[in-house]
Image (cartoon, rainbow, N blue to C red):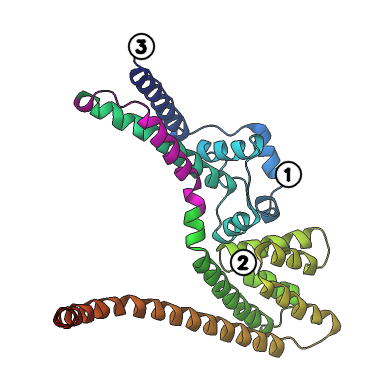
Amino acid sequence: MPDALFASALVAAAVIAVGGWIVVCALLPRCVRLDDALCVLATEGPEAAVAPGPMLVADGTSRLELLGAWCYQHGRLPLSATTARLLMLTGRTVGDYFCNKLVLAAAGLLLPWLLALAIRPLTGTVGSLPAIFGLAAAVLGWFWPDLAMRSVQSQTNADADEALNTYFDLVVLERLANLSATQSLEAAARLSDIPIFVRISAALDEARLQQRPPWNDLYRLSRELELPSIADMADIMRLDDQGAALAEVLSSRAKELRDAHLMHERTRAHQVSERMTLWMSIPVIIFALIFLIPPLLKIAGAG
């Protein structure tokens, strides 16, 4: 009767060999297909690179990223609204996200088998333990990117707020340079390549190419990113159509956003300080118990 562990080790080795071959193929340069090049030329512009929602791929020559996007599209893998929002705020693509999930899940599935094969001369057969640990590690590897994104969600939101505050200041400066409302938004958005600026620039370019006011596109972007400040900015800039003076209104709104962001940061710092105080009090309690327990025991024994 064949050894199940040995057969599993052979399968794992074959999978690793195929994975190595895929990595080598991914690193090799490839020629761009003519239809892809013509499609890029036909849809050239920021609106083609940044569509509503997170991008599928950013590098069309990365086979691993294309593999992740293909699995997402054809495997109908779930992508929650919160995850999509975090991907847009961090500038990551769907292909990169699912590629990380697949790689970590495959690594978690294969590592217990490789470890069992390495220690087999010392321990003999280990039964079904590699399969159990492999499945558990695969599940953990699949959900690890989600846990990592959730752990830095507050910092991501804070970075987005800081970027919007900076964008407001830039729009005010462009407006003081005697540019129109739409021109001020476009000029300020092109000054940086961070994800928030890229998203705003893409929405403005799409509206400009379709020859329509950009306000509805900014409202949609505000809902997608869950950043109401973008909608507030659109409301203020729409006053330009009525001939209103926008510089003072924009400056006032930018100051309000900075004050709100500063208050939020102070609240978060206060919460962190309170958590540190809790951990600092634990050693004090331990030392107090060390000094109080012996007299209490002595009193209890005398009584």
| Sequence-first tag of 1 and 3 | 3
Q: Quadrant of the N terminus?
A: top left
- Is 279 positioned to the left or the right of 223 in the image? left
Rendering coords of residue 78 (x, y %):
63, 45
Q: Residue at x 80, y 87 (%)?
A: 244
Please state the extent of the stretch shown in magenta in the rendering: 122-146
Would you call the spot at circle 2 few (<14 residues within 10 Å), some (14-19), or many (20 or more)? some
User: Could you give the CA–CA distance between mark 1 and mark 3, rounded to whole angstroms?
Assistant: 59 Å
Question: Callout 3, which amino acid?
Answer: Pro
For residue 190, which numbered disc appears in the image?
2
Q: Which residue corresponds to the image point at 67% horizontal and 55% vertical from the top-left?
A: 46
Secondary structure of the residue carrying numbered label 2 = loop
Residue extending furthest right? Answer: 242
Disc marking residue 2: 3
Asked whether, in this view, residue 47 is left or right of residue 21, the answer is right
**In magenta stretch: residue 138:** yes
| Circle 1: residue type | Ala
Q: Nearer the viewer, residue 143 or 15?
A: 143
Measured in 3D between alpha carbons, the distance from the residue under mark 3 to the one under mark 2, in whole angstroms, is 65 Å
Residue 221 at what x, y percent from top left? 70, 64
- Residue type at numbered disc 2: Arg
Do the CB atoms of the residues marked 3 and 2 lie less than 8 Å apart? no
Q: Secondary structure at mark 3?
A: loop
In this rendering, the answer to whether 170 lies above or below 79 is: below
SS label for mark 1: helix
Q: Residue 59 is drawn in which quadrant?
A: top right
The answer to which quarter of the image holds residue 290 is bottom left
Residue 201 to residue 116: above or below? below
Sequence-first disc among 2 and 1: 1
Residue wearing tag 1: 42
Disc with the residue nearer the chain's start (3 vs 2): 3
